[in-house]
Image (cartoon, helix red, strand yellow):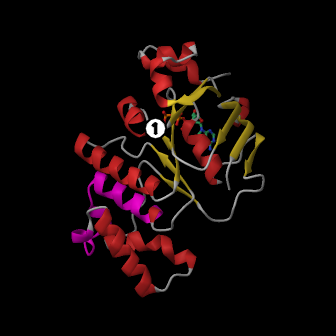
Amino acid sequence: MFPIRIQGLSFAPQDRAVLDGVDMTLGDEGITLILGPNGAGKSVLLRILCGLVEPSAGEVSWGGGARPARGVMMVFQHPMMLRASVLDNVALGLKPLGVAVAERRRRGMAVLERIGLAHRARDSAPQLSGGEKQRLALARAWLTRPRLLLLDEPTASLDPSATAEVERIIREIRTDGTRILMVTHNLGQATRLGDDIVFLADGRVCEHTLTQRFFSRPTSNEARLFIQGELPWNLGFRS
Ligand SMILES: Nc1ncnc2c1ncn2[C@@H]1O[C@H](COP(=O)(O)OP(=O)(O)OP(=O)(O)O)[C@@H](O)[C@H]1O
């Protein structure tokens, strides 16, 4: 599946260029953070990689071949919960892999232990808090051992302690060997989690560099302004 090479990727609904020739290469390890202003196309980029959105132009090569049928998972900002128990929700991801019910439940309980939700296994999943739902969604994806995990602002509406817990789980998933590509608006989080930063603005990748370098020596004016909190909000759009 790796390296994932993105070349000339564009997305232009109704001729409005959201993504306008994105080029990027992702190796097989680590956590890459995508930063950029509102409307820069960060979520669209993840959705294209996940196969949920068709690009208008460009190519993605997965280790020199087509997108694999399995191995790519995405967790959304507001993950969906079935009207069922926490355990049934977490074990759900194993169903399409043909894992038997008893084994699904065994592995489900094991992952709930790792995310600190084993004591809620029988509770109704839709009644969990936002932070607990996000942990459950991460566990559901983790259980399938994805090679690539796409995370769209997983801590956007969480308080600092729930955010810290989600970040701990993300680090564990990475240590388990999953490649992570994640969108965030939280610059502190980017410094805590990111090995490297992709900065998207004006429909293009303005910078793709190591995290420390991005924050200490940004090379593009857009990134400098963004870090200083001064990037004009309309920069994400091209007409
Ligand atoms: N499937 C779609 N069809 C048409 N337009 C879309 C589609 N998905 C997203 N867009 C538009 O693309 C633009 C970029 O959206 P996107 O959600 O990727 O931005 P973002 O960088 O993630 O922004 P934010 O930081 O605010 O979440 C928006 O104007 C959005 O309305």
For the N terminus, give its image quadrant: bottom right
Please provide percent x and percent y for residue 105: 38, 80
Residue 231 visible in the current orientation? no
Given residues 87 and 189, the one toward you in this image is 189
Residue 127 visible in the current orientation? yes
Q: Is residue 126 magenta?
A: yes
Question: Circle 1: is it few (<14), some (14-19), or many (20+) Cα within 10 Å?
Answer: many
Q: Is residue 160 left or right of residue 90?
A: left
Q: State the SS at label 1.
A: loop
Please provide percent x and percent y for residue 167: 35, 47
Given residues 206 and 92, the one toward you in this image is 206
Please provide percent x and percent y for residue 4: 68, 47
For the C terminus, give its image quadrant: top right
Amino acid type, label 1: Gly
Q: Is residue 80 left or right of residue 60?
A: left
Q: Is residue 23 left or right of residue 80?
A: right
> For the magenta stretch, what is the residue range?
118-141
Main SS category, magenta section: helix
Q: Residue at x 51, y 56 (%)?
A: 178
Q: Check disc 1 and report the residue beneath it.
A: 194
Given residues 74 and 181, the one toward you in this image is 181
Q: Is residue 149 left or right of residue 139?
A: right
Please provide percent x and percent y for residue 41: 59, 34
Q: Residue at x 48, y 86 (%)?
A: 100
Q: How many marks?
A: 1
Ligand 1 shows up in the quarter that is top right
Q: Residue at x 34, y 57 (%)?
A: 135
